[in-house]
């Protein structure tokens, strides 16, 4: 799949004061040589504070460096997931092995995050599983919780594992409303 490219943005730190942009790029992103970075600069892919850069500029603390990586073909990955539970605030999905949870390592669009956000645009993961791992990934649908950095979200989730001949007893979702779905109970905990 050809993605849309990506703009990698960093703020120049005080450690690199006086260094040329070209040497800074080669040390910040060592996957490419200085020659490769010079070609990216020549192609107009890099800017400092919104101005297309040449590489000979001296960098200064606080400057905004942007590398506009052109679109690239991503490695193949599974393009499916199963929704196990959802309510207005929480989404639990079964992630297949081989599908990255988040962008990284050459993956931008072929990720569980992007697939889930096609169906639920405000969903953000509470945690992640490695690409080779299959299992349950929880997403919050509440922007205020996602902005707290989902990994520190104060939500408790209880999964009842096993098969029952009768439906599970009523449980409570993240807003203390009864639900029978999957025997899952969620509750918000008080902030620290």
Image (cartoon, rainbow, N blue to C red):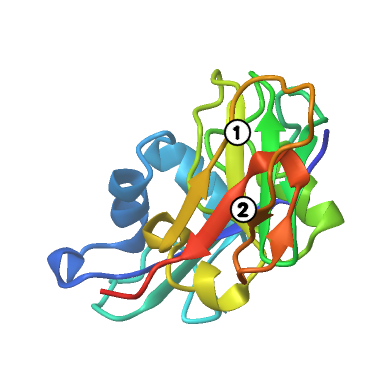
Which of the pair 151/163 is nearer the observer? Answer: 163
Mark number for residue 77? Answer: none
Give the vertical position of 113 relative to 73 (above or below): below
What residue sits 79% from the left and 29% below the top?
166
Q: Going by the image, does 77 lie left or right of 23?
A: right
Mark 1, other Cα within 10 Å: few <14 / some 14–19 / many ≥20: some
Does the CB distance between marks 1 and 2 fall below 8 Å?
no
In the rendered structure, the answer to whether residue 46 lies left or right of residue 58 reads right
Determine the image quadrant of residue 112.
top right
**Residue 126 locus on image (x, y percent):** 51, 53
Percent x, y of residue 120: 80, 59
Q: Is residue 148 left or right of residue 91?
A: left
Secondary-structure class at tag 1:
strand
The residue at which mark 2 appears reads as: 139
Percent coordinates x, y for residue 192 in the rendering: 25, 74
Of residues 32 and 89, the one nearer the viewer is 89
User: Which residue is label 1 attached to?
Assistant: 136
Q: How far, Cα to Cα, is label 1 from label 2?
A: 10 Å
């Amino acid at each position: 799949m050809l993605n849309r490219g990506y703009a990698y943005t960093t703020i120049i730190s005080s450690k690199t004061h006086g260094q040329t942009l070209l040497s800074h790029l080669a040390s910040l992103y060592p996957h490419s040589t200085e020659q490769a970075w010079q070609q990216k600069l020549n192609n107009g892919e890099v800017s400092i504070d919104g101005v297309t850069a040449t590489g000979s500029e001296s960098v200064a603390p606080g400057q905004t460096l942007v590398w506009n990586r052109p679109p690239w073909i991503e490695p193949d990955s599974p393009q499916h997931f199963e929704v196990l539970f959802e309510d207005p605030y929480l989404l639990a999905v079964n992630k297949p092995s081989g599908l990255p949870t988040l962008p990284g390592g050459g993956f931008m669009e072929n990720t569980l995050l992007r697939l889930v956000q096609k169906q639920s645009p405000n969903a953000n993961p509470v945690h992640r599983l490695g690409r080779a791992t299959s299992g349950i990934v929880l997403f919050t649908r509440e922007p205020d919780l996602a902005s707290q950095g989902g990994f520190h979200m104060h939500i408790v989730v209880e999964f009842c594992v096993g098969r029952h001949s009768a439906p599970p007893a009523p449980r409570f979702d993240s807003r203390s409303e009864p639900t029978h779905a999957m025997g899952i109970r969620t509750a918000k905990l008080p902030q620290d």
